[in-house]
Amino acid sequence: MASWLKNISKFFNHEKRSQSKYFYRLIWIGCMSACIPVVLIGGLYYYLATNSLTEQIKSDTQSSLVLFKERVERILQTIELESHQLATNHLIRDSFSTPFFQERLISHREILEQLKVRTLENSFIKEIFYYNYKNDFVLSNEYGYISTDSFRYKEDIEMIMNAKQDVGWLNLPIAGAEGNISYVRKLPILKSGKPQGLLVMQVEKAPFQDYFPTQKHQSSFILDHQNEILFKDNESPLNTLSKNVSALNSIIKSEANHGIFYSKNENGDRLLYTYDGRSTFGRVYISMIPQYAITEQLTWFRWMIVSSIFVFLSIGILLSVYNTKRAYNPIKQLMNYSKSLSKQEVASANEGELSVIKDCLETLNQEKQKLGTLVDQMEPTVREWFFQQILEEKYVLNDNFYRKCEGYHIPIQSIYVVMTINIADFGDTKRFYDEDKPMFFFAIKNIILDLIQNDPSFDEIELNYLQDNLAIVFRFKEEIPSSQIREQLQGFSSNLFDSVQTSLSLAISIGVGGTYSHVSDLSKSYQEALLALQYRIYKDPETVLFLEDFETSKKKGMFFYPREFETRIMESLEVGDLKEAEQTLNEFSKAVSSFESYNSIYQCFHLLLSSIIFSLEKKGKSIIDIFEPDLFGQLKAIQTLDEINKWFMNDLFPLYQSLSDESDMSNGSLAVKQICQFINENISQDITLTQCAEMVNFTPSYLSRLFKKEVGMNFRDYVLMRKVEMAKSLCVETDSKVSEIADAVGYSERNLNRLFQRYVDMTLSQYRNNHR
């Protein structure tokens, strides 16, 4: 040690620092002086930090349990609400009173579609089936229509029918063995006597494991209203309840909604129990952490104090060994290196090391932005962008154009044809959304590339996504005759249509433009392909449309607007005969389709729509209600004659009947009364305007205006008023606690007090004292 210190002293003498001995003494005295207060302060800090950390662990445990409860409750209540909505659906509700319902295949299909929609909308639901006791059959997503004896969940159905509860969560034998928990509801609802059927939703347990708290050694589970385990995490053993009977009894008997406490289990282990009490549906969320797990988290702090002493001693030694020049030397090297790399001017050494490093980081950021800009410019590739410019005719035919063609290996003279692809199913807005289009076009693009690889007849193709269409540029060898080109395109289009239909369950329309020998004429072929797609309006059965077929077969002559059919349609609508109106509409469509002109056909349907709107306006209907659905915009978005007929029959005619019905107001009053009754009967739930609008088949905006007109207040104020009235009644007529009253009206205690104070100007306790 002495020899080592002597060498260090020589090093300082070599640097001509005469006071190195005194400097070393100061360093060592400082280190020794630091050790004593470090030990004293560390001991005090250990005591305070241990308590603080323990409380923090408790708080984190409670917070994770609350978050776990909110997430799981939201999922469970959503499933329970969907079950109620399905049970109140008129198809299921009327199935028990409809004679020979087992033979009504259309009703079966509609019920199965409802079950499938619910299953697809909620990823947690694995299976939904409807059981009819009277007719002894089951409708299932997996099996469709099946007799009860052949259904693999027959044992589960018998267990549910024998159970006392009408609705709730059950762990059934067969479904439970498959890792599912079932939410069952006996049908029909709100009727006494023996149930006539069942609605069962099977929910996978595995996805719920992602919502359980993940703290080490923590066990969590959920009790239902009968104090049976509903869910548990994978870490919890099966005998969790049996080992913690005393603690769980304390939680069950507790009047508090939530709490945290220590208790020993039957093995004598001390555990920290955290619970969040009964929810609206009687579920209790419980978490357990052994005390030794909390203690283990404090072990690191004990070693921190000892380590701190050695750290401070090490700092003193390092400060005495390394002088300022050697400490500064790496930074100086970094500055010199950054200057040699950067072409921009950086701060001088006199301005400080931080300025130099800051300038270097700014240079790196600028280079990063340049690289990002370059990447953005390369998407799509330059070649694809150039083809897009040609198709959209955004180019100038000059030497630069020909140089680009040569640079991108695009022949000037060749045989070019443009094909456009449009997804026909997007006219059905209930199935797809506009944001889904790029995804489907990407899938179709991959299918096209696979077909091209298997078909050597094409010389080269290019793909571009333009104006909600996929444009394909085909290049053929010059010696191929035009008849063979058409035959190849026809075959390719048929294969593409079948592949898309099989792989994606989509219907597509394909338009093919003319054949040109110069690359600059690609824009003409592209516009012709788009024009060919427009002829779908009277050529529905044809999926591949060649413009040359329509250009050579255009009819010439005089055509007249079918006014007599329009008059018959209007007369049928005015008397409410929708069937006659639909039949006449079909005759109207046949008449206008004979025009074989895209613009003429659309103008005829626009005139018919204008006549219907004018008729509604003459009846005195609100012009706001008429134009709110944007009828002309909806008609413009439809591409085929069949879709236009369906839109008139399924959307416009019912809308006309709804707006023109003389008993509209009385029907509105009945709907509002039905909603008010629903609010009164379900005051403990979270009731929304959208939910009620779906129940009476109104739009939310129309229901909001109608509700305020009938009741005198808006929907939200009425719901809040009814909750306050219910709270008043429970406050005066019962001895329930404020928390229990809050649960009964679907609020937390804090929010209920705020709401009560807002409407009554006093708290619940004050109101109870004043009215008893």
Image (cartoon, rainbow, N blue to C red):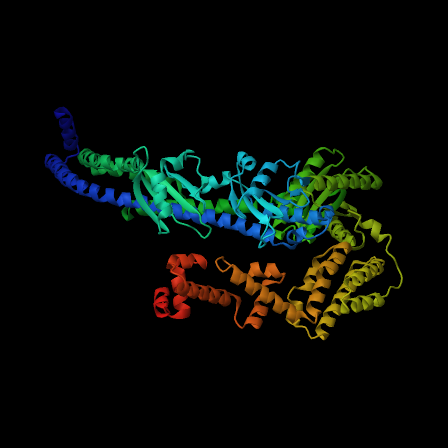
Left or right: residue 81 compared with residue 511:
left
Q: Quadrant of the C terminus?
A: bottom left
Q: Is residue 723 visible?
A: yes
Query: Can residue 153 be spotted in the picture?
Result: no
Q: Residue at x 71, y 44 (%)?
A: 472
Number of labels in the image equals: 0
- Foreground residue, 414 or 417? 417
Question: Looking at the image, which residue sits at the far right?
Answer: 557
Q: Is residue 748 above or below residue 73?
A: below
For the point 37% across and 65% down, which residue is it?
764
- Closer to the camera in the image, 46 or 201: 201
Q: Measuring from the top left, give residue 581's x and y in whole percent.
A: 79, 63
- For image coordinates 27% across by 37% down, the residue present is 298
Q: Quadrant of residue 565?
A: bottom right
Q: Nearer the viewer, residue 464 or 32?
A: 32
Is 710 placed above or below 456 here? below
Along the viewing direction, whichever of 740 and 645 lies nearer the viewer: 740
Question: In the figure, residue 14 lies in which quadrant?
Answer: top left
In this image, 341 relative to 8: left or right? Answer: right
Q: Could you tell whether 288 is left or right of 127 in the image?
A: left
The spot of residue 418 in percent (x, y) is 74, 46
- In the picture, the quarter occupied by the N terminus is top left
- Measuring from the top left, give residue 611's x and y in whole percent: 76, 69
Q: Residue furthest front?
A: 193
- Which x, y percent locates residue 89? 63, 54
Q: Is residue 563 above or below residue 163?
A: below
